[in-house]
Image: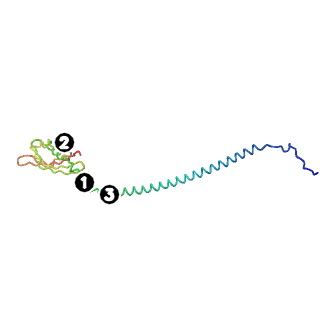
Amino acid sequence: MTARPPLDLNLATRPLRNRRAYQASVRVLAAALVLLAGLTAFIALKDGRALARLKRDMAETERTQSVAAREETRLKADIAREEALSGARVELVNSIIRRKIFSWNGLLTELERSLPGPSYITSLSPSFTGAGEMALQMRVTSRSLEDLMAFTTALNGSGFKNIQVGAEQRSEDGRLISEISATYERPL
């Protein structure tokens, strides 16, 4: 018979160990690690694509904004050019409108109310000076200096401004002829 190798039954130097639970837990952890690595790679790819799409959208938005800014600058220049070209025409039309809506009845009524009984206006020269003002040059004939003073006081009370009495002279019949300038501010 052949000799068989002796059986090594010395358990004291090499005890049997149960490594199945350890190996199973290592395999589960390795599988979980592989699964997590795959999930991480998937999320990174997905987020990378989303980030690239956002960057493209942001670049497109910036291009659109720059085009809009250039268009705004061009339009502002066009508007400024048109305002410069048509400014005189607009002012002409506005002055025509101001003259058209001016209440001549109101002006003449105020002058009539301000005149003392024996005084009268012999000449009246109006001219538009601003958006709501009219400069008046008038020649007034009155009986005395008191009548002239009453007239200028009444003009001042009626809304006339910058009232100035200019040259004065006496007529042949003794009446006082005065040059008066004033500014009439009318409501629109």
The residue wearing badge 3 is 82
The residue wearing badge 2 is 158
- 10 Å neighbourhood of mark 3: few (<14), some, or many (≥20)? few
89 left or right, relative to 106: right
Along the line of sight, the residue nearer the viewer: 184 or 173: 184
Disc 1 or 3, which lies upstream in sequence?
3
Q: Position of residue 140 (x, y in %)?
A: 12, 47
42 left or right, relative to 29: left
Residue lying at 53% horizontally and 53% vertically, measured from the top left: 53
* On screen, residue 111 above or below 71: above
Along the line of sight, the residue nearer the viewer: 145 or 188: 188
31 left or right, relative to 120: right
- 10 Å neighbourhood of mark 1: few (<14), some, or many (≥20)? few
Residue reaching furthest to the front: 1
Disc 3 or 2, which lies upstream in sequence?
3
Query: Contact, CB < 8 Å: mark 3 with mark 2?
Result: no
Q: Secondary structure at mark 3?
A: helix
Residue lying at 10% horizontally and 41% vertically, measured from the top left: 117
Q: Secondary structure at mark 2?
A: loop
Amino acid type of the residue that numbered disc 1 sits on in the rendered structure: Val
| Pair 2/1: label in front | 1
| Pair 3/2: label in front | 3
Question: In the rendered image, which quarter is residue 143 located in?
Answer: top left
Along the line of sight, the residue nearer the viewer: 113 or 100: 100
The residue wearing badge 1 is 93
For the residues labelled 3 and 2, the Cα–Cα distance comes to 42 Å
